[in-house]
Structures are given as C-alpha cells and as structure tokens.
Amino acid sequence: MLFSLPTLAEPQHFSLAEKLLFAAMAVASAWLFWRRFGLVLNKILKSKKDPGFHLLPIGKRVWDFFWEVLCQAKVIRERPLPGLAHAFVFWAFCAFALVTLNHCAVAFGIGFLNPAGPIGGLYYYFAAVFALFCAVGIAGLFIRRFLVRPKWLGEKLSWESGFIAFLIFALMATYLASFFVFRADPSARTLWWLHTLALLTFLPIIPYTKHLHLVLSPATVFLSRGSFAQIPPLSGDEDFGLVAGTDLTQLVSLQAYSCVECGRCTEHCPAANTGKLLNPKEIILGVRAYLNDLGPSSDQPLLGKYNQQEAVFQCTTCGACEFQCPVGIEHVPILVGLRRGAVNTGAWEDQYGSKLFLALERGSNALGLSPAERDKFIQKQQLPIFDGTQEYCLWLGCMGGYDPKGREIVAAFARVMNYLGTSYGILRKEKCTGDPVRRLGNDLVFQQLAEANLEALAQNKVKRIVSICPHCVRTIQEDWKEYGTPPEIEHHSEFLARFADKLPRAVGPGFSPDIKPTEAEGTLAPEVRPSTSPHSHGSNPESSVTGHDFSRAEKPPIGTGTLAPEGPEKIVFHDPCYLGRYRNVYDQPRTVASLAGELVEAPRHRERSFCCGAGGGLSFLGEETGERVSHVRAAELVATGAQTVATACPFCNSMFRDAFASTGATSPQLFDIAQLAARSLPPSEPR
Amino acid sequence: MKIIVAIKQVPDRDAQVRIDAAGKWIEESDLQFALNESDAYALEEALQLKEKHGGEVIVLSAGPERVGQTIREALAKGADRAIHIVCDDLGLRDALGVARLLAAAVKPENPDLILTGLQSEDLGQGQTGVIVAELLNLPHASLILHVEKTYTGLTVKRELEEGWFQTIELPTPAVLTIQSGGNKLRYATLMGIKRAKTKEVRRATAAELAVDAAPVAVLERVSLPQKQKSTQILPGTPKEAAAALVEKLKFEVRVL
Amino acid sequence: MSGILVVQEAGRNRISFEALAAGRVLAHFTGQPMQTAAVGDPNSTVFVEISGQSPAAAYAVQHPLLENYTSDGYVVAFEQLIRKLEPSFIVFPHTYQSRDYVPRLATRFGQVLIGDITGIEAGPTFVRQLFQGKMTGSYRHPGDGPCFLSIQAGAFRADPPQAGTFTILPFEPEIPASAIRTKPGAPFRGSAQTVDLGSAQLIVSVGRGIKEADNLPLVQDLATALGAEIAASRPICDNGWLPMERQVGSSGQTVAPKLYLAVGISGAIQHLVGMKGSQCIVAINKDPDAPIFEVADYGIVGDLFEVVPALTEAIKAARQ
C-alpha cells in the first residue's frame, strides 16, 4: 500500500440531514446565482437586435472559439505569464466539470466516477494535474494582483478578486488534499464539505462580479461581429447610433457584461497612454453601469453621466483595445457608435469637426481644397487618367492628391509601376472615401461620399484599385459594403511585395540624389537635401540655393539622418494600424523595406504597433490634450537607432514629419515604402 | 419670430464651370450644385434666432427641380418648412426679376424678418435682398454679421470696410443681408435629413405669382477671363526682388 | 434724358476718382456730357477734395438727415436728384455703401444695378466677373430708363487729382424724417485686445526657415513696417517661439487676409489649408520647389536672412 498511488477519498453514506443541508445549500446557491444572472441575461436579451448580424459563416466562429476560448491563445499571447496562469485556471475548470458533477451526485449516493475504478481513477488523476497547475496559477495571479500590482488593474485593490482567488485555491486544495486521506477518515468528509462550501459560495459570486466573464465570454467570443473593428449598419429611420439605452444592441450589452476589467485595452490605448481622458476599459464599464442603473429600455443619454463625450472623441480607432481584448469585446464599434449618436443628432460641437464635415458636405476632399489643385498635380506628374483599359485604378486619396508629401509617395509609387510596366490610371472624379467622417460618426456625409465614389467607379468600369493609403483601402473594402459592391482593392505594400523579386535592391547605403527625404513643415528643403557638394555655396548664388548652407545651422538639420559609412542602412518599419491590425498585412511592407536596407524592429511592432495619432479622423481635429501620441511613437522609433523610418501610410508619414520637426535635430529620415522602392530604380527617362 | 430665409442654389465653388454652346451661360449638365455660402450663414442666423426666441423659420428658394435638394438640406439643418418657386428660367431673370418672385412669395406670409445671404457665388450681384426690401417697402440693412432682437425691433452689427463695424437699430419687419463668417455653421446630420422628409415644401410657379421674366439688364455673353492666376517669381538680388515686390504690393495688391 | 452722372463718395477718394475715370470712358463711347454729385457740405474740405477733378460742375447733395449714412436717406435724396437731372447713366464706386442703397434706388426707377463692373466696352457693354472670377460676363442695358452702374475698385485707372476750377451746385432734397427707418451707430474698430488673425487684413507668417527664436525680430520688423499681424506655422508655436494663438493651419486658425506673406514656410498641407483663402499670397523661401510656391501669387526664391531686411527697408521707404 505504501508504494501504491493514493486514491481520492470520497465520503460515502450521507445522512438525511446532510442530504437536506446540501440540497438546501445548493438550491440557495443556485437561486442567488440566478437572481443576478437572470437579470443580466434579461437586460442582454431585452436589448435591441443587432442589425446586419449573421451567424454564418460559422467556421470562423468555431475556430475563434476553439483558439481563443478553449486554447486561451489570445490570453497567453498578449500577456504570457499571467496568461498561462489564467489558462491553467480555465483548463482546470473545464476538467473539473465532471468532477464537480460527481461531487454533488455523491451526496445522494449516485456518484458515477469511482475513484477506485480504472476510468474514475484515471480521470481523477487527470483532474489532479490540472488542479495542481491551477492552484499554482491562481496563487501566482494573487501575488501579481496584490503584491506586484500592475497599474492597468486600477489603483483600487479588488478584494473580491482576492476572495475569489482564495475560493479557487480552496477548491483545488481540498480536492488535492482528498488524495492524502482515507475514505473512512472523518477528514475526508470535512474536505468534501469544505469543497462544497467553496463551490457553493463561488457560484453566486460569479454574476455579481467581473467573474461573470466565466459564463459570458465564451458566448461573446463566439458571437463577435465577424470582422475586426466592424461598424454595424444603422437600421430604420430612428437609428442614429448609440444615443440612449434603447440603441444598445444585444452584442453591446453582452460585451459590456463580459468585461473582466483586466485593463489590457487601456494598457495599449494611445489616448490613455498620453494623458487623455479616454480609457477604453472605463468606456465599457460606463456602458455596463448604464445598463445596471437604467437598463436597455431607457431613453436617458449614454453620454453624460456614464461616459464622457470628450473621451469618446479622443479615440484614434487604432483598434489596439479590441485586438487585445481577451473576452471578445469590440471596442471600436462601441466608441464609433457613441460618436455616431453624438454626430448624427448634432450633439457634438467642435469647430474643427464642423469644418471637416462642412468641407465634405460640399467638397470632394477632407482638406477643403479645390479639386483643381489635384488636377494640377495629376498634370504636372503626367499621371494617366483611368479610361477603362488599364489594369489598376490608382486611388490617390486626400493625402496623395493634395498633401505635398503624400504626392511624393504617389509619384514614387507611380515610378515603380511604370518600371514594372503595370498599367494604371487615376479616377478623375475621385472623392474622399469618407474614412474620417465614418470614424467620427457622420453617417450622412459618409453615405454621400461612398455612393458618389461607387457610382464613379462603376461608370468607369474599375475592376481593381491600388492605393497608398491604408485608410482608403479599409474604407473602400469594408465600410462601403453598406452601400454597394466595391471593386477589388489592395494596398501598395501588397502590390510591391508581389513584385519584390523584380525590384532592384539597394546597392550601397544611403541616398539617391533625386529623392528628397521628407522634411519638417517649414523646413527649407535644400538644408535637408543631401548634396553631392555640401560646401558649394558661396560665389554662385544658384548653388547656394540648392546646396547645404552650413553657415547658419550648427546642429545637423532636421531630417538629414546620419549616414552609416559602412554596412546596410538600418530601417525601422512602423506598422500603420489600418494596415496591420485592420488588414493583417505585416510582412509585405517589410519585404519591400528590406530591399532598401536592414530592418530593425521597434519595441512595439506588428500587432502591438503603437498608433501615430492620426486615425479616427483625429488628424483633422484640433490640438490634443496631454502628450501628443505622434511624439511618443516618434521617440520610440528614433530610439531604435535606425537611420530611416519607413511607413506605409501617408497619415503616419505626416504625423511623424511634424513630430520629428518639433522633437529635435537628429531625427532619422522618413520614407514611405514606395519611396524606398523607387530610389533604387534606375533613373527614368522623362515621360 | 417668423423668419423667412431666401436661399440660392449655386454651382459648387469647386466645380469646373464650362461655357455653354451659345456662349450665353454655363453648361449646367453634369455640374454639382450647393447652397450659396452666405445664404448658409443667413440660415444659421435664422436658426439661432429661432432657438433663442422661438418662432418659425421658412426657407424660400427659386429655381428648377434640382433646387429641391438644397431646400431639403436647409430643412435638415432645422428650418420648419419651405417654399419652392419652381422656375427653369432663373438665368434669364436679372436681380430685379428674381426679387419680384421672392417678394411675391414672401408677402402673404407676413414675416417679422427676411434674411438672405449677402451675395451669390455665381452672379455675385449682391442685390436681391436689398431689392426685396424695396419691393415690400421694408427697411433693410446689409452686410450683417450679428443680429440681436430688441424690445422694439433689431440691433444688428454691420461690417464696414477695412476692419470697421457699425451698429444699426431698425424696426421689424425688416430685411437683412447676411455676411459670411458671423456665426459658426452647423453641419447637416442624419437625424436632420430624416426629420426633413416630413416637413412641408410648398411649390409655387412664376405664373402663379404673376411675375414676368423680362430683364432690364441682359447678360449677352459669357467668356473666360483673360488671365489665370499663376505664380510670378520675382527675380534678381534680394534688394531688387524686394523692390519689385513693393511695387506689386503698392499697385497690384494695393496694400501699401 | 441724357448725360452721365458720377456719384462720388466722401472719404473714398481713390475709388471715387476711378469712378470718374469710368465716367470718362462712358462719355467717350456715348458722347454724352458728365456731371458729378456727392453728399456733403459744399464748403467742407472733404467735398472739395473729391471734386478736385474735371468735370467742372458738381452737385453737393446736402440735408441734415444725410449727415449719417442711411440707405433710406440716400435713396430719397438721389431719387430726387436723378429725377431732376434725368441722366441716362449713373456711375457709382462699388463700395459697401453703394452696395447698400443703389439696388434700392434703381428699383425705384424699375431698373437694376449692373454692379461691380471691371470694364466698359463699345456699345456700351459692361463687363463684370461671374462665378467668383472664373468667368466674365458682358451685360447690355437695352431699355430706355437710366442705367445704374457701379465700378470695381482698381478696375479703372484714376488720374492723380489736379487743382482746377469747378462749380459746386448745391442740391437740397426734401427728406421727411419719417422716411428714415434705421438708426445707424458710429463706426467702431473690431476687437483689438486679443489676436484675431481671422479678421486681419495683412499677415506676415513665419516658418521653420527662421531657424532660431533669436532671428524672429527680423520678421517682426517686417510685420511692423507693413502694419501686419504676425503669424506662424505649427513648429514655431510648438517650440514656444510664438504663442499658440498665432498658429495658422489645420490645428490653428484659418485666415483669409488681403495679403499673406509667408517667410521660410515650405507649405505643408496642414499649413496650406489654413491660409489658402488669402487674396494674395507672397512666399519667400530658399527652395524653388517648396510647395508654398504652388499657391503663391508672388514668390522670391532666396535667403530670407537677406530678402527680409531688404524688403523691410523697401517698405519703409515706400511708406514715407
């Protein structure tokens, strides 16, 4: 016996009193659970149906459920150690389903897992392994919450979490301890009752606390809207977005009650990290508090007491929150929904926002410029007009058509397309895709722009679009679907990566004389343009204009970068949110950038890339409060020591251009990947 | 306060206008139209007065069917109802002819206040509002940036030249022509557009209003201006360039 | 009915002389004689100054109720003068004042003002801008009533005033006090205490080309010489070299002055959107390819540290 393995001690022969006591306790526990859970469920079910929600295709849902819920992949990936600890607890709970059922059945003498039998014995050992890991895991999580205290868990210590941790630990401990006592021993009975007590205390606590996620989050993950940061359609004549409780949909309510308050969203939020009011976790909790206090039938405004308008309009829609969320909350549709509610009813008053909306109500671009300016650029660059014969429609976007630096990106990309012999043309009647108004919640202007563009594309029989702007790509491909069928579209990084083997590699370090590095606003370009003869100024007034004037600038001027005399140029690529998280395109721009030099990575890259601050229409709004998001990210990119920052989005480009201009003299060069690809091309004949 | 706002639909200021085949007007097909800018400010002023003092805002516009779009946008921004004078020959009428149409439509409404924009972006005459005042024998004030209702009538802020302003008191009913920039314009909202669907748009024709079209001043020909704006680089040494620029500032830009 | 009546405006000498010049062009085409009129006391120096040009005869329209301008008063007064003189053309300078009352006045005669004209051609045909200057329209006045015209500032070249002999004919209209329904207040300046770039007529704006805060006085001197407000692009305000309220651009103010002089500003889009509505844009920049030159009316390619002092001196000299 000494050397045989211990068996789980399962008490037998419960007295009638014991049976009655257990039954009473179980009923009380279940009743307490339902009293709250039924209410929550009712609030969720009473919420408005989600317009445009389809369960199909089911395959993706099943996979997400398997991967994110059962495998806990997201939880572990984003925070490996606590994630693994959480996974141990979760997996133990799964393993314990049978154990717990049997545990209760035993009280009435109808146990079905015999600890001494081959199946039961094996299963108890199987569960014991999980229990052991779970006990270690929960202890670790306890230490993290109460001793390490990461800041995104909030200032206040959550005693309920401590108590829950204790209960879980007790459940596991009493289970494991049962292996070390004899069945006949009274301590076996004591352990059984302790286990029961822990279990029946734990059950009703679940719906009253954030541990509700145990029950809800599997459903939340399974019932996601289907794609990342998807903005749902409005339904009927009285739907203006999230205005009041009556606008909260079942998914929004389900998600609000699923929040586990882990703070991953806040940890990664560019607004929350730069001293702004917005805290995505608090937004979700604000919706939950509204539901708790007023319910889904209330016509009280959602913005005001429970969430603040100012916070909602600080979101860059970078999607970091939604991407990180382990319980399947879709923050972007909620934030955009609240904005829609404010904008579609005219409640949002902001001078810059109004200016943007008015510009797009009448005009064709978000910058409020005349289309004649765009025509001038097209003529000057001799860009072909789309006439139905070309393979691609090259979509300029507002930045590509009007912004001097965006135009340089377009020109560079056009050069590459010419080199590759790809035919393309510009749509003359192109208007803003509506990205900024879509994200700011102006459905009226968005619809007008989407419909006008769809019509122009259809008239010109456009089949494929390529664009230098990830925001255009996203909006055309996903958001326009509400109003028609957009043509196929790809981002220029995808196009360029496909032809990477046909593009020349950079031979040496550095610059090509006919491309200027992007300079800061207001900087005199000649100073940032490396010259073959930097000291040529002097007698010849012509050359003093184009040469580098060292007489006034003692410090190295902005944007020059430092040329590495040997070795390949070090390039850091900044993942634009709308290309990475929104489109899942990470490798292609890197493929293109690596043609020009050696890639290094910023601490936050790929899925974890930190926003430049421009998204969500914010580049058109006024000054930020707190620190500028762009400055934080720019500093991070500079700290990599790379000579070149590569982007693949004209908005990122513009934000970093400003940031580099105001943060200091030794900034890296700034290029779009199209410019990097173009600068290794052989000099082209003027067309 | 019952306020009528006379608004005009004009070719979008960013639109590429082309001369028509006869050389007498512009090619209107395939052209984008929008609400005249200073009329937008007149509408805004009317809506703000209504929000402060209550009452009704009626939008009045003359033109072909396409004007309906602009009227709906004005209703969406908050006007209560509209009168559309349906006429396809607006281009043939001069400012007096258009003002007669508007005055005939205004008269039975007996409003307390009539607002129009200062001038239209297409013809740029800047007269219609003032003529309406004369036709209705009402006092008027032009180039108004700000309107305040007083016990007896109105106090308005009028823009004068070169950064000067003036306050004018006038009794109601009155006509005001509104200068752009006095208020912040509101943006159109989805809710406004949906609500506008149920608002009344009364239609009237020139014949019903008994106004004929014969103009006093005839627009005979439309042509392209001789020179387009282009950048002129002033060459020479810094001193020469500076001297050349001073000449331009003095005689072309007229700021010295 | 014959003759050309040019109505001048006290205190607006240059454009009044230009209206006279337009009257002469009209006289040349029609062969009709020209008379002038203006509101004011015939003995006042203002009136003398205005009429200091041929033709020899000028009507001094005077009445106590015309001392302060009201459209009602002017309409009544000029209606009587026109009925008395029966001219076939009446020419006004196109000013804020004439725009206010002439349309009303014309209506009294069943006429309509052909306003803001930039040229007079044989016929006579009157030329004016349409569609904000994108087109030109030629107007004719076929009827037999008086033809009301107003001329755009700067469209006709005014000769310098010459001392000459002229007769002032007083004209006293009958104006019942009840005819004047509006009560005008005294003119006042726009708020001057805070920076209001939006209503500034002249702006000198500085960008990163200035390099250091210590160089700013160079641009400040230029602004002072011009009598302009100083503004800046974002980096200048970000660095705290000028207060944020002076920032022009997408995150600052939107301006539309008569003159926008951009010094050392390359012209990033964020800046351009804030100043593209300016009537005249002048750019001084070292880089001939700087985007600011695409929107500029006049450009000087050169070192601002040389151009700006030269310009300041030249302006000071011109101002003397």
Image (tube, grey):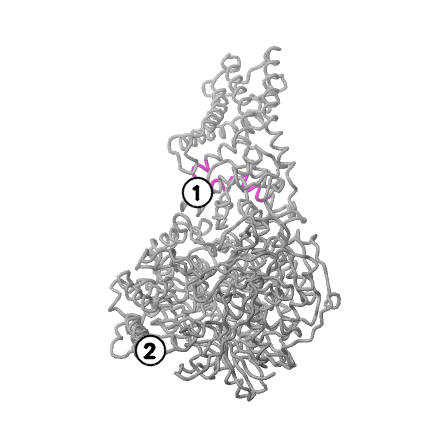
Asked which secondary structure carries label 2, the reply is helix
**Disc 1: host chain:** A
- Which portion, as a residue range, is magenta? A62-84
Q: Which mark is residue B223?
A: none
Whether A77 is drawn above or below A398: the answer is above
Amino acid type, label 2: Ala
Q: Main secondary structure of the magenta part?
A: helix
- Can I make out residue A470 in this image? no
- Can I make out residue C69 in this image? yes
| x then y, percent, for residue A306 | 52, 38
Whether B35 is drawn above or below C78: the answer is above
Q: Which residue is mark 2?
A: B241
In this picture, residue A149 sits left or right of residue C57: left
In the image, C219 versus A31, the foreground residue is C219
Q: Quadrant of residue A140?
A: top left
Label 2 packing within 10 angstroms: few (<14), some (14-19), many (20+): many
In the image, A389 versus B164, the foreground residue is B164
Q: Which residue is mark 1?
A: A267
Residue at the image point whose x is 65% and y is 41% from the top: A48
